[in-house]
Each structure stands twice: as C-alpha cells, then as structure tokens.
Image (cartoon, coloured by chain):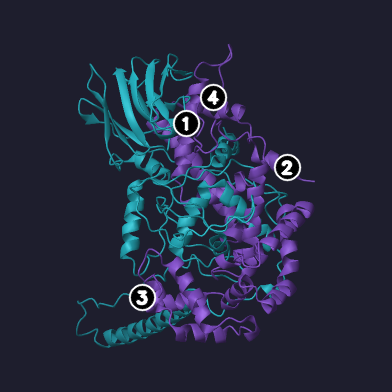
Amino acid sequence: MPSSPAAHFITSALADRLLRKADVPSAWGVTAAQFQSLLERSAAQRFSSVSPDARTVETFAESLHCKDLALASACAAGNSAAWDFFVNNYRAELYRAARAVAGNSAGREIADSMYADLYGLRGSPTAERKSPFEYFLGRSKLSTWLHAVLSRKHVDEIRRTRKTESLDDPPHGDSSSPPRIEIAAQPLSADQDPDRERYLALLQSVLAGVLAALPGRDRLRLAYYYVDDLTLAQIGKILGEHEATVSRKIERTRGEVREQVDFVLREQKKLSDAQRGLCYEYAREEWPFDLTAALAAKQP
Amino acid sequence: MSAQENHISLDGPMRRVLATGVPSAEPCPPPDIFAAYYEHSLDPEETERYDVHFALCPSCRAILAGVARASQNTPQALDVKPDSRWNWKSMQLWLATAAAGVAAVLIIVVLYQRSTSNSSTHHAEVAMSRAVATPEPAKSAPPPSAAYAPAPPDAPRDETKIPSLPLTKSARSPQPVAPTQLPARDLGARENASSASDSSDRKRAVPPADQSKGVNGLRDANVTASTEGAATLSESAAGGALAPSARSAQPPANNNQSAANNRAMRAQAGAASSFAKVMKPKAQAQAKDLVVSSPGSKITWTVHTNHVQYAENGQPAAVQDFIPTNSPIAAGSSPGGNVCWLVGADGSVVRTTDGRLWLGTNSPTNSDLTAIKATSARAATVTSADGHTYVTADGGQTWKAQN
C-alpha cells in the first residue's frame, strides 16, 4: 500500500500502459507490479509536500523516462540482460563523461569506482545488493543522472583531498561552521588612511547585501561567471539560455549591482562623492581582481 | 571613474562575496534533481527554489558545472527524448491553441470594426453629433510564462521578464553604464574547465526547527555511501526552505500546503530578500524581536533578520541598517550613547559605534553566543551556549577566554 497521497494515483493500469509504451524488453524481468512500485516511489518523492490530483500525477508519470527507469531497476536487481544492455550502451559513455569531468587519469579512476558502485556491494552471497541505481527516479535521462553522480563524486573527492583552504574562504577553525562574510580587513600600516578599513568593510557589507537581494537566477549567473569561470555557452547550457542572453543579463546585473551599491553608499551611508571614490579605490587596491585581465591570462 | 573602472573595482569584492558560500536552509539535492534541473524538467517552482540554493552553494554549482562538461558531446543514441514531458508538451499545445484563439478574436474584431464604420457612415446624417463607440480591441491576456518552455537546442531564447532589482530613486539620473565588452572566452570560445570550482567549501546548515517542512522531492533520506568519498546520491532532507527570489514563477497548482510553505519561506526573510527591505521602513521581524536600549539616552535598536531598526526618542529611522551576518541574533548590549553590540549563532559578533553602521568583529568561538555585556565601545564580555566566557578590550579584534 503506497504511503504517499500522490502514489495512490499510480494505478496498475497506468503502470502497465507506461511499461508497454516504453517498450521495455521482457528479458529485463520488470513486471507491471514492480514498475508500479517504481512509479509510486517517484511520485511520492516529487509530491512529498503537496496533494496533487490524479491528472497531475498521471501527467508526471508520463513525463518520466520510463525505459531508463526500468533499466536502472533491473540493473539494481542484478538482471544480466539489463546489465548487458547497460554495458553495451552506457559504459563507454560513462568513461567519456568521467574524463570530461575530471581529466584523463582521475576520470578513469572515478569511472572505475563508479562502475563498481553501480554494480552494488555484495559482501557475501546472501548480502543484499545495494546499487546506486535504486536512487534513480526517472526524472531525467539515465545518462544525465550518471553525469550528475560522476560530477558529485569528483567534487566530493576534491573536497576530501584538499589540503589548504582557498584564499577566498574566510578563516574557520571548525570546518563544520558556516562561513561568514569577512568584514575585518588587514591591520593598518602607518601611512594608510585610518578610515581605509572602514571603507572596505562598508563596501563589502553593502555589496553583500545587494548581491543577497538579487533574484536567485541572476546571482547564480554571476557566480558561475565570476567564481566558477564558466564560459557563457556553458552557463547558457545549464540555465537553458542562449549565450547572447547570458552575456546581456550578466552585463545588466553588473550594472544594476553597481548602481545599487552606489545608491546605498550615497543615500543611506551618506558618503560623499569623494568618500565613495575612496571606497572603490581601496577596493581595487585590496582585491585587485580584474575579470578581463584574469581571463586574458588564461588564454593560451 | 568611468563605468568600466567602476565594474573593475567591484569585480574583486564581488568575486569574493560570491565565492563565499552562504548557509542554506535547504539541503543540497540528490543527483536526480541535478540531472532534472540540467534538463530543465523541473517545474517552475522547483527550478526557482534550486536557483536560489545553487546561487549560494559553491559545491552544488561545481557539480552542475561538471554535469555541463560531461553532457557535452553526449552520443545521440543516449539522447533519447522521453515519451512525454512534464507539462512542456501540454504547455506548448496550450500556447498554440491560445495563439490561434487570439488570432481568431482579432480577426472578428477587425471585421466588426469595419462593419461598424460602414454603418456609421451610412447613418452620418442622422447621428452626426454622437460619437460612434467603436469597441476597443480585446486585450488578450499574455500567455503564461514560457520561461521554462523548452527551446530548440540552438535557438536564441528569452526568458520571462524578471522584475528588476529595485533601482535608485535618486533625483539624479544614474550614470549610463557603458556596455562593457565581456572577455573573449565567452563569445563563441568554448573552454573546458579543467577541474571543478575551487571555491569555498559547501556548508550545510541544519535548518532551524521553526521552519516549515515541505521541500518537494527531497524528503526521503536514502543515503548510502558505498565507499568513503563515494557519491552521496541523496541527502536527508530536514525540510526548511530558502526565501524565494523576487522573480515569481507560475503559482503552483493544487497547493494549499505549498502556499503555506511559501508563506513560511517568505517569513524567514533570509539574505535573499532582507536587504531589499532596507529601503522601506517596514520590516520582517525575526522569530523573537530583540530590542536593545542605550542607557542614559533614548536610542533603541530593534533587531530583525539581517537588519536593525534604529530609533531615537521613539522615532524610527527612515531606513533600516544592514548587519553583516546571516546568523540569528540572540542578545545585545549597549554601554551607552550610540554604541551597541549584538551576538548570535555561530559566534557572530557585530558592533556599531555610531548607532547606524554595523561592522563584524572577530569571533571568539564558532559556538553560538547567547549573552553579552558591553561596558564600552571596546570592551565586552560574551557567553557561549556551551558555557564559556570570552572578553575583549580592543573592540573584538582579539578575545580572551575566561573559562
């Protein structure tokens, strides 16, 4: 008996229809009842906090990648025909994607490790097979899901093996504590403007507030561009935007941020033109990151 | 300073601020969400929610960047479209039907106008003084947001218009921002990033207990790490949510619970929305309003989430002041005058010496701070949740543990 309200709308007739429509080979051993359980699980996950109607759930079920879902389930169960299909159709792609994510040597290691993971642990003949395939819910293509798992594995590995903190990280004694925006700047030298620290802290706090108030997608676009160094094409691919659209929106957001920061410094913090100029000048000296120059330096 | 120089001077601090992960009330999603997000098959509400999360989470962005790299040049055999898409096909059908309907209405209106003008001419001698009321063209409702409708792979596509960031209302018109040329790597240049982002570690915050649950698709905790460092495929979701971005997507259907969740999300007023409220006197209160009074003067500070309302003689200031911490504030102390100290979760300590400008100080500990007693602008004693006491005599630059 399904526990989620949404799962109640996954009928055996619907499951049977989708299974036949997906043209799942019978050799994979996925029965209609099993497929119904898979659909119920996906629906339960998707609608965990809402109570959809039957039509919504049915539309959702029809949007799933049913054949991939059946394949993943059959592989998780250890079906040899399904595994043969997976090896023939996905293994090469797995290794290619791993190389794209992590480079040649690290990519191969990750792909080997992931391949073993996908096969599932088996400590003894009676041990329960536990494969990551069980977590595939069919909301995307199986290949994209594999890419996400690979990428996550790679990021986890980087974090695990990283020995030093990034210069951009605020200092933390405890890595489990959340990072805070560093406000206090370096101790002053004798010939520095005594207000320099104040101006820098002020600019940084205002900028942090302005960036925090940006719509999520605008901030995401900026973060990909400034921090993750993705190309416009890559950003566009992730966000579903054309390259030119990404460029235009980044430029627009940069301008809006600049105007908003200037407004806050002028109207709320009551800084004069000269004082605001000092803010920007000190910021340029303290954090001399010129995006254009940095990217030019990366050009071959 | 020219517009180009202005951009450059903010590039450094912007990169710094963006690189700093912000604790998210929402846990990082499992790989199936990453994959669905990348394929744009999440619904608009989910997409917007994850936009906010990914904007604040460097690790999740790194994972998405990896998915983008991995998905380039995927063999066509594996690029099989599903039998149907969640809403997209039906939405396209709806749009086509709506467009046909609008066209039909316009044709009818034009024909009616023509027939009406013909008859008015015929009756001109009879009713010359009476204006002919020609019906206005029917105003058709704009089609629903197509922000997330799928587009042909290489076609330019515009997103739904996004409400713009509240801009200055200064009497002076803002300086026109010269369109800066984005660097050459961007337009047409495809670079494969060599590795994932090296930015700060992801920090996963346990959401506060009073946040509502109800994160779609993230409830079940079925985490299995087969080996150390292996991919964590799904995360336990304790619920909670980020404040939504200013951009609103289509309202979710069937969503009494979701509407309640959205209200709860907005009530949290996290970093995404609270700064915008600095411009308006009205503010969202944190769960428990903290009011700090300055002894010997009539100054008070009312602490809200991420900002403070300054008041003197009972008169609140026109704008509220931003405090440079996202952590909830637990206690405050004023030794007098315009000096006020605030402390809160994760060792946060902020201070003002002029009543309005709040700066963070160094923190004595990463534990939550629950109390503070300030005796001057430079001297204060704080107490942490685990019972330790720390003292500063230099305005929070350095702290000494008392026990």
Q: Nearer the viewer, mark 4 or mark 3?
A: 3
Could you tell me which secondary element the residue under label 1 belongs to?
loop
Q: What residue type is labelled 4?
A: Ala
Q: Mark 1 points at which residue?
A: B366
Q: Tell me if B401 is positioned left or right of A248 in this view.
A: left
Rendered location of residue B207, percent (x, y): 41, 47
The residue marked by circle 2 belongs to what chain? Answer: A
The colour of chain B is cyan
Three-letter code for the amino acid on which mark 3 is drawn: Asp
C-alpha separation, residue under disc 1 versus residue under disc 4 = 19 Å
Tell me the residue at 34%/18% (across/down). Answer: B374
- Colour in which chain A is drawn: purple
Residue at mark 2 to residue at mark 4: CA–CA distance: 28 Å
Q: Residue A185 carries which label?
A: 4
* Residue pictured at 55% horizontal, 37% vertical: A175
Q: What element carries label 4?
A: loop
Q: Which one is earlier in the sequence, the residue at label 4 or at label 3?
A: 3
